[in-house]
Image (cartoon, helix red, strand yellow):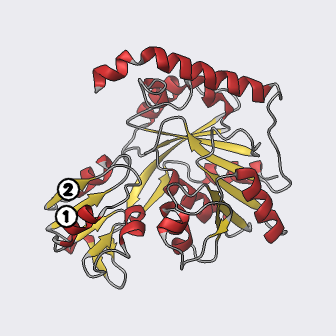
């Protein structure tokens, strides 16, 4: 597979050039971007999947929610519905997507919506909530039809976009030069022990523009695992099957191994739709641990006493106040 991707290099160049032309047409306003009276903050990435967008959106919610009336807008990836929908806790992941449902369940008072047409979604939210103060636009860095007030670009510690190439040879959605549209670049999934010298090396690799801020974040795993009606200390939780349907389960696997947990791992693709065959296999497992995103898709299909998830949070390293300052300055 690796060598096949190299053979596809000419297609990568062609794809990258098409995306660059598209961006150029937006930059010179041949193709039109629309700005809105309500500030829109865009969160996205150059790499395909696995950069930690969902926990980053939740960090933005926790940071903004005390002072602003906010909403999140996602396309609702792999949902079986279409058009604009405001997410409620009674929805299923197949109706609204796993990540929007997760936002709603974690923040019940939050306005959460899905729409594959981002312009229509923003306008629908404005009509429903005239006093809305911020919209968080999820996974929309390449969505140029909306002109955000600020753009936040994510790239992972283990897979910086400067070490990658455009699809299909690599995993980038556009050339690295697209990063110049970002106002803030956040390196995600960093080790908690990341030193200032290591941060400087990464900064030199990314070479941010003078107008771009650069922050580093890490994953903070909960001390508890949760089921629908039970909470248990992770240190007492052992001998289970880990089920993941996310782009990059390596950090989670490494964390569990560092705690000397005993488990087998069933790994599926990102946003995997669990089939009857999959569920039959899982039903034979005594105890299952999964991510919260996967829990959204599995909770209605497996015994609630069998299924647990491990909550996570993203935290900014060294200077957590820098994110809040950036957001407040962006919303002026």
Q: Residue at x 31, y 64 (%)?
A: 290
Is 255 above or below relative to 67? Answer: above
Q: Position of residue 46 (x, y in %)?
A: 54, 35
Instruction: Tell me if label 2 and label 1 are in contact, CB under 8 Å.
Output: yes
The image quadrant where one finds the N terminus is top left
Q: Position of residue 107 (x, y in %)?
A: 57, 73
Q: Is residue 23 left or right of residue 252?
A: right
Q: Position of residue 241 (x, y in %)?
A: 19, 64
Report the disc number at residue 241: 1
Q: Evaluate whether residue 311 shows in this view.
A: no
Report the disc number at residue 265: 2
Q: Secondary structure at mark 2?
A: strand
Q: Evaluate whether residue 154 shows in this view.
A: yes
Q: Is residue 33 left or right of residue 308?
A: right
Is 128 above or below relative to 17? Answer: below
Is 186 above or below relative to 303? Answer: above
Q: Position of residue 168 (x, y in %)?
A: 43, 26
Q: Secondary structure at mark 1?
A: strand
């Amino acid at each position: 597979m690796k060598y096949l991707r190299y053979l596809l290099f000419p297609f990568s160049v062609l794809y990258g050039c098409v995306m660059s032309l598209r961006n150029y047409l937006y930059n010179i306003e041949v193709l039109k971007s629309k700005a809105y009276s309500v500030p829109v903050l865009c969160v996205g990435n150059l790499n395909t999947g696995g950069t930690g967008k969902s926990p980053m959106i939740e960090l933005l919610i926790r940071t903004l929610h005390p002072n602003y009336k906010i909403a999140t807008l996602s396309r609702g990836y792999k949902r079986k519905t279409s058009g604009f929908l405001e997410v409620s806790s009674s929805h299923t992941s197949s109706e609204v997507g796993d990540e929007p449902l997760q936002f709603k369940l974690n923040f019940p008072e939050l306005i959460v919506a899905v729409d594959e047409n981002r312009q229509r979604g923003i306008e629908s939210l404005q009509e429903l909530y005239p006093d809305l103060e911020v919209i968080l636009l999820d996974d929309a860095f390449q969505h140029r039809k909306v002109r955000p007030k600020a753009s936040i670009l994510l790239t992972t510690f283990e897979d910086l976009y400067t070490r990658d190439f455009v699809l299909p040879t690599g995993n980038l959605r556009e050339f690295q030069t697209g990063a110049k549209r970002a106002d803030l670049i956040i390196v995600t999934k960093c080790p908690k022990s990341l030193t200032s010298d290591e941060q400087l090396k990464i900064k030199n690799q990314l070479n941010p523009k003078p107008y771009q801020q650069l922050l580093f974040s890490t994953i903070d795993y909960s001390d508890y695992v949760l089921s629908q009606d039970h909470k248990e200390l992770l240190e007492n939780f052992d001998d289970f099957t880990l089920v993941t349907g996310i782009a990059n389960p390596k950090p989670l696997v490494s964390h569990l191994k560092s705690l000397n947990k005993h488990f087998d791992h069933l790994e599926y693709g990102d946003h995997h739709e669990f089939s009857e065959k999959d569920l039959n296999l899982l039903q034979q497992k005594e105890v299952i641990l999964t991510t919260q995103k996967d829990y959204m898709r599995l909770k209605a299909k497996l015994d609630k006493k069998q299924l647990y998830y491990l909550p996570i949070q993203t935290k900014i390293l060294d200077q957590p106040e820098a994110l809040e300052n950036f957001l407040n300055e962006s919303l002026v």
